[in-house]
Image (cartoon, rainbow, N blue to C red):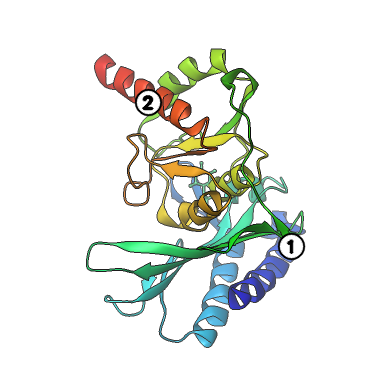
Amino acid sequence: LNVVVNAVQKAGKRLLRDFGEVEQLQVSVKGPGDFVSAADIRAEETLRAELSRARPNFAFLMEESGSHGAADWEWRWVVDPLDGTSNFLHGIPHWCVSVGIEKRIDADRSEIMAGVIYNPAADEMFWAEKGVGAFLNDRRLRVSGRKDMKEALFATGIPFAGVPRKAEFTQTLARLMPQVAGVRRFGSAALDLAWTAAGRYDGYWELGIKKWDMAAGLIMVKEAGGFATDPEGGDPYAEGNIVAGNPNLQPKLREVVQEGIAAAGAAR
Ligand code: IPD
């Protein structure tokens, strides 16, 4: 974890400098609604250099450059160098660096053992380690204790242009809105999970996100005493469909997401 904390601090410093001169950054379009900037790429290079120097045997799964290292890795870093790229490019200080540490169990299974999510603009370092707990800087994190949907504040991600499952999203939102205190979409899946771990949100759901968006956040929510599953209650990591939250409200949120998915299917 020390290795990761140092690496994300270094990448974060670099990103903050680029954030101050965001108009000058070179930006390219990966797909509809999906952007990458020179800042994402520089941060990824910093992380790769720092992490591989400390642990030469670990493999990588990285948002911008893909997989590196042995195919039969035992350990790998799962890295989003800049989660919340659209916020970053619009000058909104809500974005982060996210690094998960994944261990292979057997040919088909792996486990996230630790994760770090760093928001440089707020200087908030979220970290978690299996069996140790989840922390914000040096303060222990717990998910919220709310039980009543009427008091709940949930976060989500709105599918952008190139992403499928828009009907599932709108059907879920239509069902959820009348039942809860509010729904937020701040634009960084990793921070949505970190904030759920911190009890700021009572839960978060999104369909079709990537491993690098959720690896570190998954362990954070679990170590803060929350649940993080797919809408059916299984492992969210493979398909990228995630419903996270405190143990009282996550099952209720999951039910609403399941209803939304079923309604979207029935309408087709
Ligand atoms: C995106 C953000 C966003 C989520 C998208 C992600 P990126 O990651 O996490 O909140 O809704 O699904 O792709 O592209 O900014 O690293």
Tag 1, which secondary structure?
A: loop
Q: Position of residue 60 (x, y in %)?
A: 42, 72
Is 146 placed above or below 107 here?
above
**Residue 150 x/y as whole percent:** 61, 17
Q: Residues within 10 Å of mark 2 (few under 14, many from 20)?
A: many
Residue shown at 34%/76% (left/top)? 74
Please state the horizontal and vertical placement of residue 178, each as a whole percent of the image: 55, 12
Looking at the rendered structure, the kind of residue marked 1 is: Asp
Q: What residue type is labelled 2?
A: Glu
How far is the residue under mark 2 from the one under mark 1?
38 Å
Taking depth in this image into account, of 9 and 22 the one nearest to the observer is 9
Q: Mark 1 points at which residue?
A: 138
Q: Is residue 136 above or below residue 56?
A: above
Q: In which quarter of the image is residue 76?
A: bottom left
Sequence order check, earlier mark of 2 and 1: 1
- On the picture, is 252 further left or further right than 167? right
| Residue that numbered label 2 is attached to | 168
Check disc 1: other Cα within 10 Å, few if <14, some if 14-19, many if 20+. Answer: few
Q: Does the residue labelled 1 lie within 8 Å of ligand 1?
A: no
Residue at the image point whose x is 32% and y is 76% from the top: 73
